[in-house]
Amino acid sequence: MTTATRSMASHPRLPRWLLFAVALLLVSGRGSCDVDPLDCGDDEDNDGIVSTPGVPVCSSTDRNALLRFKASISSDPNKVLQNWQASRLNCCDWTGVTCDGATSRVVRLKLPNQNLKGRLDAGLSGLSYLQVLNLDNNDFMGSIPASFGGFARLQRLCLSNIPSLSGPIPESFGSLKSLQLMDLRSNSLTGPLPSSFGMMSNLRNIHLYGNKISGAIPPSFGLLSQVYNCDLSNNRFSGPIPDAFAFGLKSLAFLFLNDNEITGLPKDMRNLTRLQWIDLSNNPLMTGDSVQGIATAPLISQIEMSSCKISGPFPAWASRLPNPSFTLLSDEVTPSLNLANNAISGSIPSALGKLTYLEGLSLQNNHLTGPIPTEFAKLQRLQRFNVSYNQLSGKIPQVSPFTTFDKSAYQPGNPGLCGLPLTPCK
Ligand SMILES: *[C@@H]1O[C@H](CO)[C@@H](O)[C@H](O)[C@H]1NC(C)=O
Ligand SMILES: *[C@@H]1O[C@H](CO)[C@@H](O)[C@H](O)[C@H]1NC(C)=O
């Protein structure tokens, strides 16, 4: 994802179909290692490590660390560890192991999708030259050993889809100064994030989706100036995002916080100069006002806040949203505002008609009354629009695209609406 985005930003004349394809990938695979050039690298040639030529001979330190790891595995149905034998001295030839030709040290350990059962042995951190650890999609039990914070050279940590991997992210992770990719999604991690989280100063992609991590986001998070893509969704994060979060995340483009118990955003988000897409859906304790800082993020163009139990009048910040002059960065996302499935009452502000970049506007399932503002006729880029299940009345703007949306964009609900595509006004 990172490279795709950066290269798009620097090649403004890429054909639109390509941008569209990339955008699709981003949408369908958000947070997925598969479409992310900074990924866990199931393909050895594709993980960014340049091995120096030479015939590596395993160091005994590394061999011992690997044998300890093997000893803690209780089941290896695919027999991938069969050639991991003390008698086969050159561990650089063992399945899943790659050494660097110049140092002869183990730089990669990759055994994803092997149904390995057992514990993650603390002794694995003896692989002090390790750059990539990929044990995705296995059956380890227990927690991540604190000693894993000792991987000083580790760039990619891929421990996703390990359903019984539990316990907290260790405080020692603050020492992972080389880490660029942390993929711990779809595990059973708990506890709060360690206060040292922001010390992983090279982090670019964070995938913590689908765990049970709780508590507040630590203020140190705001120090992660390289983070581009951050997916904390489907956890139990609670409370407001600290103001310090908005201090230094100057590379952050995508922020997924949906399905948590977040109650608000920093008031001033001006420093989040690249933030384009924020998903706060399904945070049931949020209020309309507690997220007003979103309107200060200069490039924000895709906002999702459905199912947040927001009540009262239409959030005032929506009328203050920036109308970003079109940079290519914005082509990666679907510029849209999604406030569906809340309890917003009163009228739709006509100021939304200024947001001419919008391609999606989802307001269904609220308590909105009054007309669809005539200013909406300016929203010529709209492709998805939905105001059904409200109590709107009056004439639908009789211009395309409003006349061509499916009737289900307007009704059920809104018995007082008239004009195409509904029945003519009396
Ligand atoms: C924005 O960043 C600057 C330093 O680059 C800092 O002085 C300022 O306090 C930050 N503002 C906020 C609201 O975090
Ligand atoms: C509008 O939203 C309603 C309720 O979620 C849904 O049933 C309907 O299919 C949507 N229509 C369009 C055109 O998006």
Image (cartoon, grey):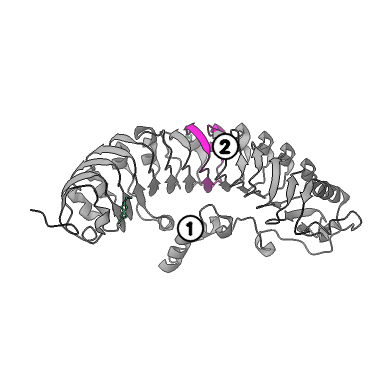
Give the SS element for disc 2.
loop
Along the viewing direction, whichever of 165 and 230 lies nearer the viewer:
165
| Residue ID at (88%, 50%) | 60
Which residue is denoted by mark 1 in the rendering? 28
Magenta span contains residue 47: no
Task: Identify whether 177 is placed above or below 102.
Answer: above
Q: Label 2: few (<14), some or many (≥20) within 10 Å?
A: many
Which residue is denoted by mark 2 in the rendering? 213
**Residue type at mark 1?**
Ser
Task: Name the spot of residue 201 as percent of width and height, x first.
Answer: 61, 42
Task: Name the spot of residue 374 as percent of width and height, x first.
Answer: 17, 50
Ranked by sequence position, the earlier of labels 2 and 1 is: 1
Along the viewing direction, whichever of 208 and 180 lies nearer the viewer:
208
Q: State left or right for residue 77 relative to residue 206.
A: right
Say whether residue 4 is visible.
yes
| Residue ID at (63%, 41%) | 200
Could you say which quadrant of the image residue 119 lies in?
top right
Most distant residue in the left direction: 426
Q: State left or right for residue 190 relative to residue 254.
A: right
Q: Which mark is residue 156?
A: none
**Residue type at mark 2?**
Ile
Q: Are marks 2 and 1 in contact (CB under 8 Å)?
A: no
Could you say which quadrant of the image residue 20 lies in?
bottom left
Magenta span contains residue 216: yes
Task: Name the spot of residue 4 as percent of width and height, x first.
Answer: 52, 60
Magenta part of the chain:
215-243
Give the SS element for disc 1.
helix
